Image (cartoon, coloured by chain):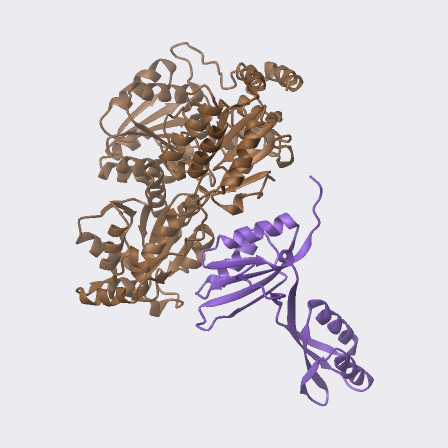
Amino acid sequence: MQQEISGSAVISLLVDNESGALARIVELFSGRGYNIQSLTVAPVDENQATSRVNVVTTGTPSAIRQIRAQIARVVPVSRVVDLTAEGPYVAREMALVKVVSSGEPRTEALRIAQAFRARAVDTTASSFVFELTGSTEKLDSFIELMRPLGLAEVSRTGVASICRGPQTIQSI
Amino acid sequence: MTLKTASAPSDARNTPALSGAEVLMRALAEEGVEVIFGYPGGAVLPIYDALFKQKQIRHVLVRHEQAAVHAAEAYARSTGKVGVVLVTSGPGATNAVTGLLDAMMDSIPLVCLSGQVPTSLIGNDAFQEADTTGITRPVTKYNYLVRKPEDLAPTVHEAFAIARSGRPGPVLIDLPKNITVGDAPYVGAKDITPRTERTQTKPDRDTVARAVKAMKNAKRPLFYTGGGIINSGPQASEALRKLVKMTGFPITSTLMGLGAYPGTDSQFLGMLGMHGTYEANLATHDCDVLIALGSRFDDRVTGRVDAFSPTSFKIHADIDPAQINKIIHVDEAIIGDVGETIAMMIEEWEKEPAYNHQKELAAWWHQIDAWRALDCLRFTQDQAPDAVIKPQQAIRRIYELARETGRDTYVSTEVGQHQMWAAQFFRFDHPNRWLTSGGLGTMGYGLPAAVGAQIAHPDALVMDIAGEASTLMNIQELGTIAQYRLPVKIFIINNHYMGMVRQWQELLHGSRYSESYSDALPDFVKLAESFHATGMRVTQLSQLDDTIRKALAHDGPVIVDICVAEGENCFPMIPSGAAHNEMILGPEQAESGAKITKEGQMLV
């Protein structure tokens, strides 16, 4: 059999919003040696009865298929979709980035923030907290640029994702 | 789960108030529960009180919670029903963990009820508190902590539905004491919609048709069947027999699948895998179409994955989509109940009964017969009356003499060499008669399993083929056997070693028998007597048959301590990480085996 190439995948799932549901998903990943790069979870229906979990994971295509099948076995999970395999999708995350600096680095940080359309949500004489939304790559490069300019702290949400077009996680 | 009608709980309000424990009893009765295996304790006292006040459900008091789970597993495996376990909080629940994982690995439907401290104390490190749902999450198919009285009855019903649906498995319900003491509404099983409906049981017709087409084109086919067929029910075993007969194909089985196809039939090649037969493993390696039915390509079956059945077209039928392509990439995957799949295969096969490769199939059988001629399980027993008994001789005679009784026989085993020999020598005619710990390999399984099987089948002959090391792991169950007067026959194949450990140490660790010798063993005859059973001992060949006959005829529990040769190894053996055609054979077959392998490679 030829060697499969390992890649990144965005898996979205709907799960009954009950105690321990997230632990079931997370323990499945750790117990079976799968990797979690990022994880987001929040209730998404009007009754707060269903949560959507978005997991970014890595593995060969067959490993990803196995992850999907294993998640589908979890009783409170009603839907699992590998968005990466199903066609175009949007994946976004948000970061709060604290930069502590003064003088030229401070001005430079503000200039780059404007170029990235990051918002300064907190400003003091010696610091900024920038809020930035976008793809993981965009956030990564923003943070890299901030590093020499006094980057002090980063808080990221992890990826929220949805498929493009009229299709939904239920209809795929 | 969801309630179907809004009226259900209000109906319950019209009936006299029931305590949670009484609701539990009623729900269990509605689910058809007849027996519970359990052990009381503080957190489950209200449940034991409710048990005391009713007559429908019988409780079997074990001597350790692990044994309760194994007994329930054997009860479930031998009846096709869901096994039920009741344990207290904290240590009661943690003691059950090994059994739950055992059931998980072997797909045994169980519901385990565990007590818990009152909800107000959860998280306070209360006496006998454990995070039971946290601890048991990875060892159960699903688990619950019941926090609200109105959830109790629906939870019990859903737990049973989940345990028995799809790929069966253990479900745990953690019951805080205030829930079982306080009032709770009753809801019937029909009034809830359990979350099991996503399980696809009906196989896809087109996929089955494609699989059958591949079977029609096969020149060297092989059925490889597993425990899924047993789980699917007796109709699956019936259908399998029909399919195998109508195709004329050879069939091999996993450890868990033994009995699904009659072991005495000429088309049966014996078990495959690490200690499988020569013919089964070489057939697996050389076949051109492999039809896996209700089996999961366990590493004990496949050996080296990249050398597993390298040239075959693989068909895999399983109810659990997660088993498909997990270990071995297959060419045709059929998701669904394996019994329905086999029935559909029969229909498709009959649509065009002609099979155009009879000549090639005959050549394949000729090849298989050549492998069979090696007689891979043959051993030489010194026939002198005072000769030391070989363990193989003991197990083969137990099988043959038990068969002579003509009684319906259930066999449990512990784990190790004796288990593999039993799997090799016992030929089962029917499913559900073979009770063994396959996936987890739990030493100490056999004795409590014999308890569960005898409770389920009071008139049957129930035997535990045991090793002296394994059986000591749950020896306290002799108390249960005594209390319920269970006429279980325990045959201890006593070689003073953890035999399989010793064998691996001999083959892989330069015969350095590190900690595998059982020093200071008890006197098993006196041990039996102290537990109100009959003890017998055999030390030489001349006593063997008579003692086995006497034990089988005795109307009561018997321990037979069969002192056997200490240094025997279980062959054939595929060392882990080796391919099926790299088997180690017994001393008697080694030379001719090497020759036949080469001939075989030229032939096929």
Residue B422, image x, y percentages: 42, 26
Q: Which chain is purple?
A: A
As drawn, B14 above or below B604: below
Q: Residue furthest right?
A: A104
Task: Give the residue at x 58% y 43%.
Answer: B325
Residue B105, image x, y percentages: 46, 43
Residue B87, image x, y percentages: 32, 52
Task: Give the residue at x 25% y 22%.
Answer: B553
Task: Give the residue at x 47% y 37%.
Answer: B294
Dividing the picture into quarters, in which one does residue A55 lie? bottom right
Quarter of the figure that contains the N terminus of chain B: bottom left
Left or right: residue B355 compared with residue A89: left
Quarter of the figure that contains the C terminus of chain B: top right
Dividing the picture into quarters, in which one does residue A131 lie? bottom right
Q: Does residue B306 appear anywhere in the picture?
A: yes
As drawn, B150 above or below B319: below
Dividing the picture into quarters, in which one does residue B576 lie? top right
Q: Nearer the viewer, residue B596 or B323?
A: B323
Q: How many marks?
A: 0
Left or right: residue B292 compared with residue A60: left
As drawn, B226 above or below A99: above
Q: Residue furthest top?
A: B384
Q: Colour of chain B?
A: brown
Q: Nearer the viewer, residue B435 or B208?
A: B208
Q: Does residue B255 appear anywhere in the picture?
A: no
Q: Residue furthest bottom?
A: A125
Q: Nearer the viewer, residue B339 or B98?
A: B339
